[in-house]
Amino acid sequence: MTEFQIDINADVGEGLNNEEALLPHLSSCNIACGGHAGDNATMTAITKLAKEYQVKIGAHPSFPDKANFGRRPMEISCSDLFQSLKNQIMDMVRITQAQNAKLHHIKPHGALYNLAAYDKSIASTIVDVIHSIDSNLKLYAPYDSVIAAKAMAENIEVVFEAFADRNYNNDLSLVSRQNENAIITNTEQVLSHVVRIVKENRVKTIEGVEKVIKASTLCVHGDTENAIEILRYLNDNLPKFGIGIQ
């Protein structure tokens, strides 16, 4: 019997070409839409795959910075950022409509995601973009973040996200990828990490402190070296802990 339900997502369309292997193990995906990676061809192909596997489709917009893969903060005005994000998401909207699919959510990428967690102007810009396109789109965002609070205050549904394959600092920020302990690759450790988050609303930080966290969706990064193995392991073992994937 499953007493808990969790969504499992991954960022896709980022040039790894592993979507055929990833999507059967996901319940939602975030498709890069041209800011840091991706183009109309990749968006179209992955939308078709997501439909085939009945995976919820999200847009994964970024700072318009392919050179740095959207992973560095970018000097850009709020108006220019607004227009770039709107253009990226509208490309996904048009592609999903052409495939008779539905865009389910928005998940910012990389530095944009991290900055929106505490930067009010960036958070407001993202929320304004969603309102300008479709206020029924859900937003994947970190628990207790500035962007989550802003979105909820403006009647946008927020789906709290945590990371299945990443370690956390005491302030609930992710451990920098420059650190050796940033990424969790051991499948049993990933499972323990996920079960604690889902069932106890807690995460053990790298300092060994248990912090409150809430999540309705968990991300496994598609570029984690053993991402497919992790996803298979979670799909096989989460039901043993009363956790269903939806």
Image: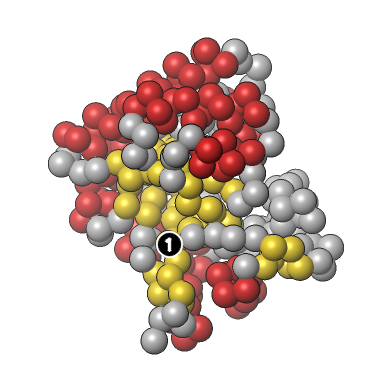
Indicate the quadrant where residue 245 lies. bottom left
Task: Quarter of the image for the C terminus: give it.
Answer: bottom left
Mark 1: few/some/many CA within 10 Å (<14, 14-19, 20+): some
Q: Measuring 69% from the left and 36% from the top, which residue is drawn there?
A: 118
Query: Is 157 placed above or below 208 here?
Result: above
Asked whether the viewer can see residue 182, the reply is yes
* 50 or 116: nearer the viewer: 116
Q: Residue 111, percent across and down?
A: 62, 34
Q: Residue 142, percent across and down?
A: 59, 48
Image position of 97 (left or right of 190): left
Query: Is 73 placed above or below 218 here?
Result: above
Q: Residue furthest right?
A: 207
Query: Is 40 placed above or below 30 here?
Result: above
Q: Measuring 39% from the left and 50% from the top, which residue is drawn there?
A: 29
| Number of callouts | 1
Element at label 1: strand
Task: Quarter of the image for the N terminus: give it.
Answer: bottom left
- Disc 1 marks a residue whose amino acid type is Asp
Q: Label 1: which residue?
A: 7
Image position of 46 (left or right of 129): left
* 171 or 237: nearer the viewer: 171
Q: Residue 103, percent across and down?
A: 30, 41
* 230 or 63: nearer the viewer: 63
* 170 or 146: nearer the viewer: 146
Q: Residue 228, percent across and down?
A: 45, 64
Q: Measuring 37% from the left and 34% from the top, which residue is drawn there?
A: 135
Asked whether the viewer can see residue 31, the reply is no
Image position of 122 (left or right of 176): left
Q: Measuring 38% from the left and 23% from the top, which residue is drawn there?
A: 132
Query: How are the colours assigned in the image?
Result: secondary structure
